[in-house]
Image (cartoon, rainbow, N blue to C red):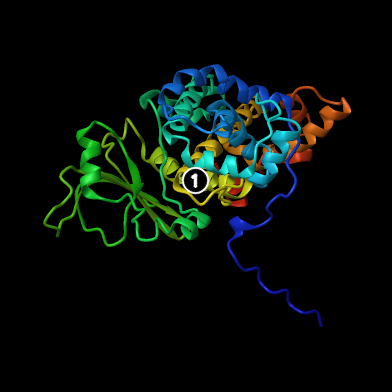
Amino acid sequence: MARKRPARTGNPDLRQQKQVPMPPIEEIEQKIYSLLSPLNFKPLKLYETEEKKPFRDRILTLSVMMALVVSLVYRQIPGLREVQRVLCEEGLLWAGRIEVSAQAVSKRLRTLPIELFAQIFEQVMERMNVKPQNQAVPENWQPVCAKFTAIWITDGSTLEALRRKLKVLQEQDLGFFKFPWFDAFTEADKFFLTRLREKTSYKVIRCLTNAPFYRDEIISMGEYRSNPCQHQVRLVSVLWGSTWYYYLTNVLDPQMLSAHLVCELGSRRWRVEDAFLLTKRLLGLAYIWVGDNNGVQIQIFATWIFYAVLNQLCIDIAIALNQPLDRISTEMVFRALYHFSQAVLRGDAHEAVPYLVERQKLFGLVKAGRKRHREISMSQ
């Protein structure tokens, strides 16, 4: 009789760390270079302190450090000592071969102003937003994109290594369900959508729709509280299987945002969970480079900068395959870059998107539809 394999224990974010850097890919580096040209770093030098620095700090300029931290993420380099070896032997991105110590890199991560990386990240996002992405947006989302200038999804997450090293976020409330917060959104003419928290008291003011599988109502919240929600909100309830889900929004006009799209937007919160999963496990954000608050923030910005580049590649693939972006697996696109790099070395490929599109079934780039979703589509 075969023995049962014991269940795996520990945090899954901290498994399967890579030990060998991924080879460089010229096309991906060109995309990174177009967003992070070293010429754009010159105005940011004004923020550098005027103190006289040791020689090793002058070598590790903002331009070199940006190439280094983005390469740590993009090439999955396992740590500072390995990135020091790669920088010494072959260089990274636009930074040529430089001989420095891992201690110098660690010190620079602790002292380089985080405001510089925040500004660079904003520049990257501005450039990314200029590129046309509408073709990757599902057709039923076009009206939403026309009525709202932007859609932001927020959630709270804790990096396990950050929790252990810095002992932060342990007592912080990561929830976003607060009446003053909702009122501030409404008074600023901004809109929100969130789940209804259990045990929240409310009173139905008006029923917009009452169907067997969903309800659309205008309510007031905090009926038994001394400080209730000052503005009315809309409650959309939907039955999925045997479970009711409840969504709150301050978009009171169903013509502006239908109950169906409210539920669709509510389900999109899992895009945040997907992003956390990809950045922490796939891009290695669960492994902290240095145990310092400044270094951790730099690592987060570097990870999100490359994640934006990777997401743009997924958009290009979605357009080429005529698929919505949600159907493209970011994880499999990233893993397929290794095979593309080997094909380039063999002389079998020159451009990433045509190569990946031609082999999309082999690499599993398009997600398989879930069984219940296929059943719903067939019944419609």
Neighbour tally class for label 1: few under 14, some 14-19, many 20 plus, Cα within 10 Å: many
Which residue is found at the position 51% from the left and 52% from the top?
291
Which residue is found at the position 66% from the left and 28% from the top?
317
Near-viewer residue (160 or 209): 160
> Horizontal placement of 196 versus 3: left or right?
left
Which residue is found at the position 40% from the left and 23% from the top?
146
Residue 123 is situated, as x and y percent measured from the top left of the image, at 47, 23
Given the current orientation, which residue lies at the most extreme left position?
A: 226
Q: Amino acid at mark 1?
A: Val
Quarter the N terminus occupies:
bottom right
Q: Quadrant of residue 55?
A: top right
Near-viewer residue (189 or 349): 349
Question: What secondary structure is found at the residue carrying circle 1?
Answer: helix
Quarter the C terminus occupies:
top right
Q: Is residue 35 above or below residue 4?
A: above
Residue 340 is situated, as x and y percent measured from the top left of the image, at 78, 32
> Horizontal placement of 134 versus 182: left or right?
right
Which residue is found at the position 15% from the left and 52% from the top?
228
Q: How many marks?
A: 1
Q: Which residue is mark 1?
A: 296
Near-viewer residue (212 or 71): 71
Near-viewer residue (196 or 77): 77
> Horizontal placement of 35 versus 238: left or right?
right
Q: Is residue 228 above or below residue 151?
A: below
Residue 230 is situated, as x and y percent measured from the top left of the image, at 15, 45
Residue 281 is situated, as x and y percent measured from the top left of the image, at 61, 50
Q: Quadrant of residue 366?
A: top right
Q: Quadrant of residue 36?
A: top right
On the question of residue 329 being in view, the answer is no
On the question of residue 234 being in view, the answer is yes
Given the current orientation, which residue lies at the most extreme bottom position?
A: 1
